[in-house]
Image (cartoon, rainbow, N blue to C red):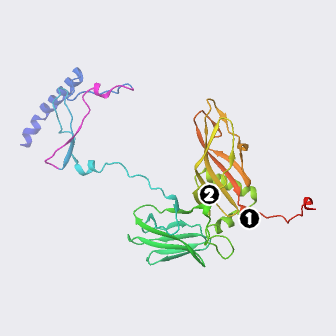
Amino acid sequence: MTNKLINRWPLLWAFAMGVSSQVLADGNMPYAASAPAPAGTDLRQVGTPLAPLVVDANANVVSIAKSRADGSPDNNDIQNVPKSVVSNLGRPADPVQTNQTIVIKPGVNTLIPVSIGQTNRIVTPFERPVVQTLSSAETKIMQNVIYISPGDKNPVAVYITEKDDESAAISLTLLPQQIPPIQANLVISAPINAGLSGLHSVDGTTAFTAKAKQFEQAQPYMETIKVIMRSLALGEVPQGYSIGKLLSGSAIPSCHLSGFEFDFKNAQLIKGHDYNAIVATVRNISGQTLQFDEMACTHPLLAATAVWPKNVLEPGERTELYVATRSANNIVRASKRPSLLDN
């Protein structure tokens, strides 16, 4: 047998070379030739049709259909692909928001997804938070921040209060999940114009504003106002401040500017210790481009006024209006002077 193959080898080589020469000479390739198509060309009009995926219902494979030059199918040159490979090519999961500002109400339980087996950071509005829980999750407190690391998938129920003050409590249920570690910035929501009576701490402040007082008095007046305005523009609430709706009875700024419409119906009131801020909207109702003038708003306790993200508005455009005010409870009153008119 070996001798016969050796004797026929020159004939087989000559036959192969002849076929190869024939192909090179007349250009008849076994499959349709392909060439780069100009940009913008419809691929369905170039060469053979696009090769579709073919799922075999009787086998756990997926093949790619390919056609010969004469249009006849041929799948022999491409290996089959397991179905699991194609079925797993789904849409990627949505990214997890790992830094969240969460508005909560005292006494109302709030659900927060957290990372399982990792350290999560809970930023509280309290100056000296205390945690009450029956969970075995590891908990560590540093200043106003709580670090918590759940070791299993069991929900973690916690109550957070100010040290030596049980008048107000934050109720949370942490839901451990397979997500990255999160930071939750807790912001208190309360009916601001009704006050926070009954929630006063030993130094006369409320448990909600103790951290705000520390922040406000740790820097010069102008720097405090800048930080407050910057936080509002970034969609944040300054640490220790609470947030609520601007309800009837609250002191609304007086704003007047030709060509602009001011809306305080859905305004927010951001309350600190020495300072408050009102967030409203302003719209250009004229038929031309106008620049907003921050001097358009007045208030008996006005500290600063700003707009964001635009101060030049096209017709119909809106922007947010921030009016920072001083707290009326913290104004130092002068000594009484006798009036000359009483004589």
Q: Is residue 240 above or below residue 283?
A: below
Query: What is the three-letter code of the residue carrying label 2?
Result: Ile
Indicate the position of residue 136 as horizontal and vertical percent values: 43, 77
Q: Residue furthest top?
A: 26
**Would you say 257 lies left or right of 131 here?**
right
Element at badge 2? strand
Query: Which quadrant would residue 18 be assigned to in this image?
Result: top left
**Quarter in which the C terminus is drawn:** bottom right
Magenta segment, prevailing SS (helix, strand or loop): loop
Q: Earlier in the sequence, mark 2 or mark 1?
A: 2
Magenta-highlighted residues? 39-59
Indicate the position of residue 144 as horizontal and vertical percent values: 59, 70
> Which residue does the image show at 29% across and 51% down from the upper left?
88
Count the marks: how many?
2
> Which residue does the image show at 24% across and 37% down from the upper left?
52
Number of residues whose C-alpha sits closer than 10 Å to that of mark 2, classed few (under 14), some (14–19) or many (20 or more): many
Give 109 or 190, whichever is nearer the viewer.
190
Q: Which residue is mark 1?
A: 330
Label 2 and label 1: CA atoms lie apart by 16 Å
Residue 22 is a magenta residue: no
**Quarter in which the N terminus is drawn:** top left
Q: Which residue is mark 2?
A: 270
Give 182 or 131, whichever is nearer the viewer.
131
